[in-house]
Image (spheres, rainbow, N blue to C red):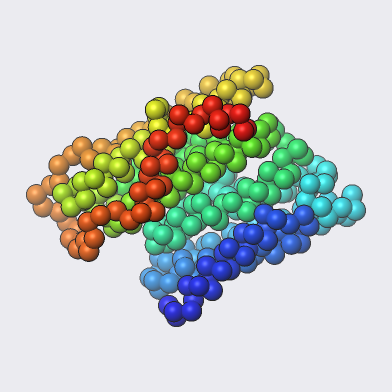
């Protein structure tokens, strides 16, 4: 890539995200989403591999369709109510269209099909952006319109996302696809609580972003694209692999790690809202996700490297983990004692 491309793309991503999350008008929010979409495409396709080009094409088509639906829903609402303000989304059909549009952008079930394929065709650090930063602007729009959304529809989509994210991740061997289905499953947890406690949904997203970033950066460090490559990395980076195991268990939501906090709060809030069956269902469905997190953790630390391997050996130029990885991993593991303070905030 051109040396000027990276700063331009980085600036565009920051600009698009800032415009969307700070706007009150639907047209400005839509503009920010479009800037984000166009900025990430060169990062997806920069390897020029056929799979990367295919991933970029799929991403562009799905995001363009979702953006058109966002624009259509906001225009329909403005036509009926005379309001372009994001928080004044009062027309039922417009709310339905908006929910569908944001679900496409986020990769919620039943609009999830593009997400694992796009992540699989992207480099690890681009996949990190797609799983975290690119989900923030659409999620902000859902939070701003949460009072007008249909709780039953969101709960159904959330439970379906938790179920499918766990189920489809069980037989995957590619780390990016496993993390894609992990993302779909976590989005289910965010969507189910969105209407009842937007602040808690935002906290869940922040913690998910921290944990997922730590996993992606660790995998990028050991250059692990599939489970076999994780198996052979223990001898080269034992400390990083042990840390990766803890972060994966945190992502699964096991106490006493950070990832337990949002699930605990969400189940508590759902019970307060007299949605005990939904709380039980999503808690049981998280066991599906737990299986593939445990399998990743098992591959990263517990098994000994095989004597022979059918993939190319990777050279490691640096033995020590980078500072951002260390900070994110620490946050992913040790934040549970702050639960009372977090609970007071949300």
Residue at left offset 47%, top offset 25%: 284
Q: Residue furthest left?
A: 307
Report x, y in % for residue 214. 39, 48
Q: Position of residue 127 (x, y in %)?
A: 44, 57
Q: Quadrant of residue 316?
A: bottom left
Q: Residue at x 55, y 42 (%)?
A: 205
Q: Quadrant of the C terminus?
A: top right
At 61% across and 29% down in the image, what residue appears? 344
The answer to whether residue 40 is above or below residue 328 is below
Quarter of the image where one finds residue 245: top left
Residue 181 in sight in this render: no
Q: Quadrant of the N terminus?
A: bottom left
Residue shown at the point (21%, 50%) measured from the top left: 237
Spot occupied by residue 219 in the image (x, y as percentages of width and height): 32, 52
Give 9 or 346, whichever is nearer the viewer: 346
Toward the viewer: 240 or 48? 240
Q: Is residue 241 above or below residue 16?
A: above
Q: x, y (%) of residue 282? A: 52, 28
Please indicate whether residue 12 sits to the left or right of residue 296 in the image.
right
Residue 25 visible, this angle: yes
Q: Quadrant of residue 298?
A: top left
């Amino acid at each position: 890539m051109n040396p000027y491309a990276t700063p331009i793309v980085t600036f565009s991503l920051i600009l698009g995200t800032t415009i969307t999350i700070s706007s009150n008008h639907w047209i400005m929010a839509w503009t920010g989403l479009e800037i984000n979409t166009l900025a990430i495409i060169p990062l997806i396709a920069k390897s020029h591999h056929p799979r990367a080009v295919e991933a970029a094409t799929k991403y562009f088509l799905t995001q363009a369709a979702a953006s058109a639906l966002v624009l259509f829903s906001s225009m329909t609402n403005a036509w009926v109510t005379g309001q372009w303000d994001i928080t004044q989304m009062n027309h039922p059909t417009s709310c339905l269209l908006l929910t569908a549009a944001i679900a496409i952008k986020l990769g919620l079930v039943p609009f999830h099909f593009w997400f694992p394929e796009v992540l699989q065709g992207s480099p690890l650090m681009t996949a990190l952006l797609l799983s975290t930063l690119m989900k923030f602007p659409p999620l902000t729009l859902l939070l701003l319109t949460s009072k007008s959304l249909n709780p039953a529809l969101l709960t159904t989509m959330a439970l379906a996302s938790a179920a499918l994210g766990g189920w489809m991740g069980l037989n995957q061997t590619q780390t990016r696809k496993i993390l894609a289905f992990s993302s779909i499953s976590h989005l289910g947890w965010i969507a189910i609580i969105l209407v009842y406690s937007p602040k808690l949904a935002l906290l869940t997203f922040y913690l998910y972003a921290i944990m997922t970033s730590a996993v992606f950066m660790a995998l990028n460090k050991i250059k692990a694209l599939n489970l076999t490559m994780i198996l052979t990395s223990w001898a080269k980076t034992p400390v990083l692999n042990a840390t990766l195991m803890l972060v994966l268990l945190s992502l699964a939501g096991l106490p006493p790690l950070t990832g337990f906090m949002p699930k605990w709060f969400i189940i508590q809030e759902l019970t307060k809202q007299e949605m005990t069956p939904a709380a039980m269902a999503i808690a049981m469905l998280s066991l599906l996700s737990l299986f593939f997190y445990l399998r990743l953790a098992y591959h990263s630390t517990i098994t000994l490297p095989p004597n022979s391997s059918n993939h190319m050996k990777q050279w490691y130029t640096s033995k020590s983990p980078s500072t951002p990885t260390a900070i994110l991993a620490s946050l992913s593991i040790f934040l549970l004692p702050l639960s009372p303070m977090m609970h007071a905030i949300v």
